[in-house]
Image: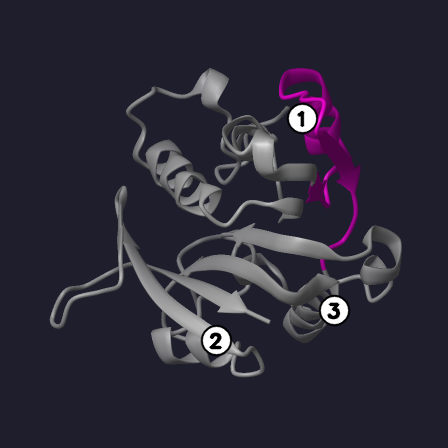
Amino acid sequence: MKYTGERVLPDTMNPMNGMLLEHIARYQFAIYYSKGRVLDIASGSGFGTQLIAKAAKSRLQEVVGVDIDQEATDYANGRYYHPLVTYKTADAADPFLPETLGKFDAIFSFETIEHISGEISFLRNLFAMLKPGGTLVISTPFGLGRGQPTTEPFHVHQLTEKEFFSLFDGYNHIERYYQRGVLIEPGRPGRHYPIGIAVCIK
């Protein structure tokens, strides 16, 4: 699979690569919320999808990894196979996605929303696919805000902290977390965090 500057391919990266360690930390964080039927949307190479399946296998029925790139799906099937995992190629903003994939007990979406111009359709899909009482864990890097320029060539824009956390007001409960390197915590006053993580209960 081609490296685009955004793909996390552990086999081709230094084990101490900062981006790799950040991604691993997010999946480790998500293990706690993994149960029943789980969706990993924008699953990329599949390493995190498999990580979840291995770590939480006793609590899982199925893990579905979805990515828009067929090459990524093929790579994931070949490199990160697990009997509990199914990889599919699909557009996260496709309005028919909930009908295609069904309902989930937990949905994970890491570093995805900043790539999607159809943000509203994507968020509607996440809500529709989550079972009542289910958990959405979603992360994004903070930036200048919706419609503002970003130095990242693959990002549509990067939301502000306020814009990001306001997206989930329709959920019954929201917990705010922040990430800096491998550290994920509720946040401390005066400390700068480049990445936000929302844990949302429907």
Q: Is residue 142 left or right of residue 83?
A: left
Q: Earlier in the sequence, mark 1 or mark 2?
A: 1
* Residue range corresponding to the magenta coloring: 64-92
Whole-angstrom CA distance, mark 1 to mark 2, is 33 Å
Q: Is residue 64 left or right of residue 23?
A: right
Q: Residue furthest front?
A: 58
In the picture, which quadrant includes the N terminus? top right
- Disc marking residue 113: none
Q: Nearer the viewer, residue 38 or 57?
A: 57
Q: Residue at position x 67%, y 22% from top?
A: 82
Residue position marked by numbered label 3 in the rendering = 128
Is there a contact, CB below 8 Å, between mark 3 and mark 1? no
Q: Residue at position x 78%, y 39% from top?
A: 88
- Amino acid residing under circle 3: Ala
Is residue 82 one of those drawn in magenta?
yes
Q: Earlier in the sequence, mark 3 or mark 1?
A: 1
- Amino acid residing under circle 1: Ala
Give coordinates of residue 99: x percent, y percent.
Answer: 88, 60
- Disc marking residue 173: 2
Whole-angstrom CA distance, mark 3 to mark 1, is 26 Å
User: Is the residue 50 above or below the residue 157 in the image?
Assistant: above
Residue position marked by numbered label 1 in the rendering = 76
